[in-house]
Image (cartoon, rainbow, N blue to C red):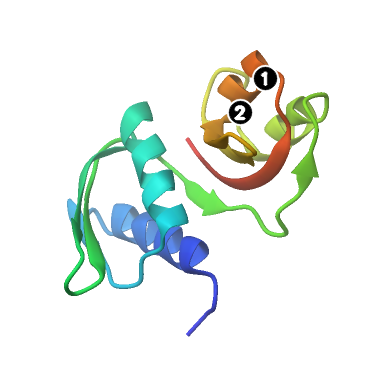
Amino acid sequence: MAQDIVADGLNAIRNAKKARKKTIEIKRISNLLIEILKIMKQEGAIKKYKINTKEKKVEVTLCDFFECKAIKPRFTVNKNQIEKYRRRFLPARNIGVMIISTNKGLMTHEQALEKGFGGCLIAYFY
């Protein structure tokens, strides 16, 4: 069993999408994974997620995306370097979202550029 809950959760979501499943149950959760799911829901990659705190798992209903992965190692970027990593991880200019952890919380790379923040790259999906 791996130690990275975010990477394990995103890999499970990606594998379920490739297997053409509509829902998936992730058995290990963290606050960071929940925040990533919240951003994925806002961007339309998943329809909904339901947290079961008693059993410490989350049920995710998948929607429309091709790829979702955690970024390892978690590169630290300033606002001028975000474009370089966007070109590395995303397929085209207006396709996909990178999730960045800033001192103001998790946000998309577009929000970070707009507000002028840098931070650590966490994950991406498109």
Q: Is residue 68 left or right of residue 90?
A: left
* Label 2 CA crowd tier, 10 Å (few <14, some 14–19, many 20+): many
Eyeballing the image, is 85 above or below 60?
above
Q: Is residue 121 visible?
A: yes
Residue identifier under label 2: 109
Q: CA distance from mark 1 to mark 2?
A: 6 Å
Q: Picture coordinates of residue 44 (x, y %)?
A: 32, 30
Amino acid found under the numbered disc labelled 2: His
The residue closer to the viewer here, 23 or 120, is 120
Which label was assigned to residue 113?
Answer: 1
- Label 2 secondary element: helix
Q: Residue at x 31, y 52 (%)?
A: 17
Q: CB of mark 1 within 8 Å of CB of mark 2?
A: yes
Q: Is residue 44 visible?
A: no
Q: Is residue 11 left or right of residue 116?
A: left
Q: Residue at x 17, y 51 (%)?
A: 22
The residue closer to the viewer here, 43 or 20, is 43
Q: Picture coordinates of residue 88 (x, y %)?
A: 73, 38
Which label was assigned to residue 27?
Answer: none
Q: Picture coordinates of residue 58 (x, y %)?
A: 24, 61
- Label 1 secondary element: helix
Eyeballing the image, is 46 above or below 71?
above
